[in-house]
Image (cartoon, grey):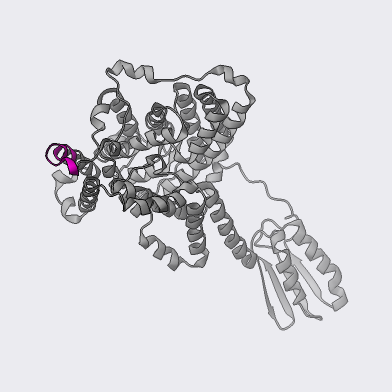
């Protein structure tokens, strides 16, 4: 594994600090929203965001992944708190889930992440992009009903969202609409070649300028044009403390008496498995989006998430995963290293302690504009055209993954995509594993790669094409593994061949029925 030194992070500070600020602005309402949807104290979502940025950013091997409370876990968390009847009891399950994740990391379970096909991962990203767009349009127009669902992959993201979209156009807020439209124009303009040629302006992130625009607009509107101002319910809502020291009173600690409750352990196991899968999916997707194409170590990520969840649970926070929406916002904002994620966590901490009152001036429509741009970049039409040109074996898993996620949820959609992708892999291997050529009465059957029971029918089909009074060469030189079922089919053919005056010769078949031992894989 390649380790980065201090100077590596220092030279990217000019990109990472602004990107961290953007991620902070995006993550802040989402942390609150996930907590609200989970039936947990709002501060629990902020604790998870802080831990995700301050602790996991440095424990992780990923330079760009951002961790925090995930909307995909809200249903599990809500039901768990209801089942246990205590939030402090639920915190025990979060700590135990973190310990299980830590154990999974040491058992090298992170290798699972390498088996997600590229078409499925990109389909997941495109689906999330579409969900973002659908969920943010109401916010952009001032119709904010459930911002806790902004990055949700639950069924709510399609069925309810379509109804919400229809209702949105009957309740448009003119102030929020002006703010979001101008913010979008700022974001688009900030990426133009004209702006990039001006060094002083280029230093400011477009998202920060968009947020500043929204705050200034609303202050002026409240004073001069109240009918065009944005109401409080459409602004960021942070818990405000009178003094910085009051911040410490917001922490909640787990009730260890729940260790005797068997339900805690089943909830912990469920949280650990689902959180680990979501993390590995998000990590794989983040690596795909990384402009530098760096590959994060998956086993180290599981350990980092385990450590983070143990700390989050001990402090009163929600369970944490690597989150693709915030990671995508990080990359979109120009983040280069894990410093940007750390800055976002640090800003959450500082804002809650000192500046919560001021951050509550930020309109949600500003943040909606930032996420709309992120959603477009994840699901831009160019991506669909690229997969169309790659062929049906790539396009179909890509499209069906998107459809499945939109109709069900993230994990079910990924499973559908993997099954479809696996079908095409098996189909390709089925035809490529065994081939036959012949000239007159001379046949050559080549086992081109590892041959399994899946190829047995193809082998029998080819052997049945051999005519009587001919010679057959069965060549296993190119294969390292030949399944017992294949060897059995060949042995049966060897026994029956003399009846048809067929002479058979075999090359390099013996001893390949067992999978050859290979050196242990280095930890990824």
State the residue in front, 263 or 314. Answer: 263
* Residue farthest right in this picture: 499
Q: Is residue 102 visible?
A: no
Q: From the viewer's perspective, tell me whether residue 290 is left or right of residue 509.
A: left
- Residue 340: x %, y % from top left: 32, 37
Q: From the viewer's perspective, tell me whether residue 109 is left or right of residue 285.
A: right
- Residue 400: x %, y % from top left: 51, 59
- Residue 75: x %, y % from top left: 51, 38
Location of residue 73 with respect to 243 vertically, above or below:
below
Q: Quadrant of residue 295?
A: top left
Q: Quadrant of residue 283?
A: top left
Residue at 81%, 80% in the rendered image: 468
State the residue in front, 215 or 254. Answer: 215
* Residue farthest left in this picture: 224
First to last magenta residue range: 218-228
249 is within the stretch colored magenta: no
* Residue farthest bottom in this picture: 440
Location of residue 269 with respect to 374 vertically, above or below:
above
State the residue in front, 216 or 521. Answer: 216
Q: Quadrant of residue 13?
A: top left
Location of residue 370 with respect to 122 vertically, above or below:
above
Q: Is residue 47 visible?
A: yes
Q: From the viewer's perspective, tell me whether residue 228 is left or right of residue 88.
A: left
């Amino acid at each position: 594994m390649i380790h980065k030194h201090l100077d590596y992070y220092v030279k990217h500070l000019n990109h990472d600090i602004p990107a961290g600020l953007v991620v902070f602005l995006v993550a802040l309402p989402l942390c609150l929203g996930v907590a609200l949807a989970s039936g947990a104290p709002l501060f629990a979502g902020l604790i998870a965001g802080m831990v995700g940025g301050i602790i996991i950013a440095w424990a992780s091997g990923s330079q760009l992944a951002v961790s925090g409370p995930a909307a995909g876990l809200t249903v599990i968390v809500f039901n768990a708190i209801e089942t246990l009847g205590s939030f402090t009891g639920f915190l025990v399950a979060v700590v135990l889930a973190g310990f299980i994740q830590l154990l999974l990391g040491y058992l090298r379970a992170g290798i699972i992440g390498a088996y997600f096909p590229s078409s499925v991962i990109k389909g997941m990203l495109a689906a999330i992009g579409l969900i973002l767009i659908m969920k943010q349009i109401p916010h952009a127009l001032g119709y904010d009903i459930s911002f806790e669902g902004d990055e949700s992959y639950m069924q709510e993201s399609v069925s309810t969202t379509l109804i919400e979209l229809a209702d949105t156009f009957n309740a448009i807020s003119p102030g929020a609409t002006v703010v979001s439209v101008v913010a979008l124009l700022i974001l688009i303009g900030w990426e133009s070649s004209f702006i990039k040629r001006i060094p002083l302006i280029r230093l400011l992130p477009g998202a920060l300028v968009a947020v500043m625009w929204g705050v200034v607009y609303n202050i002026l509107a409240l004073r001069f044009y109240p009918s065009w101002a944005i109401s409080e319910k459409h602004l960021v809502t942070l818990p405000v403390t009178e003094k910085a020291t009051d911040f410490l009173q917001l922490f909640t600690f787990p009730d260890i008496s729940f260790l005797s409750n068997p339900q805690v352990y089943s909830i912990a196991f469920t949280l650990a498995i689902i959180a680990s899968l979501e993390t590995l999916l998000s990590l794989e997707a983040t690596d795909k989006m990384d402009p530098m194409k760096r590959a994060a170590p998956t086993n180290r990520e599981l350990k980092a998430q385990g450590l983070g969840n143990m700390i989050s649970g001990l402090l009163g926070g929600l369970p944490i995963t690597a989150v693709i929406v915030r990671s995508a916002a990080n990359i979109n904002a120009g983040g280069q290293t894990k410093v940007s994620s750390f800055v976002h966590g640090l800003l959450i901490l500082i804002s809650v302690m000192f500046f919560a009152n001021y951050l509550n001036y930020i309109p949600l429509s500003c943040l909606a504009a930032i996420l709309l741009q992120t959603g477009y970049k994840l699901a831009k039409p160019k991506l669909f055209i690229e997969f169309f040109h790659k062929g049906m074996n790539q396009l179909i898993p890509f499209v069906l993954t998107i459809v499945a996620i939109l109709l069900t949820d993230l994990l079910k959609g990924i499973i559908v995509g993997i099954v479809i992708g696996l079908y095409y892999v098996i189909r390709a291997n089925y035809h490529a594993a065994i081939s036959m050529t012949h000239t007159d009465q001379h046949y050559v059957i080549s086992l081109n790669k590892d041959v399994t029971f899946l190829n047995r029918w193809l082998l029998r089909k080819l052997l049945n094409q051999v005519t009587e009074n001919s010679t057959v060469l069965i060549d296993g030189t190119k294969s390292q593994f030949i399944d017992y079922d294949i060897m059995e089919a060949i042995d049966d053919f060897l026994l029956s061949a003399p009846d048809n005056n067929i002479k058979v010769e075999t090359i390099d078949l013996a001893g390949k029925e067992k999978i050859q031992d290979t050196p242990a894989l280095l930890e990824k």
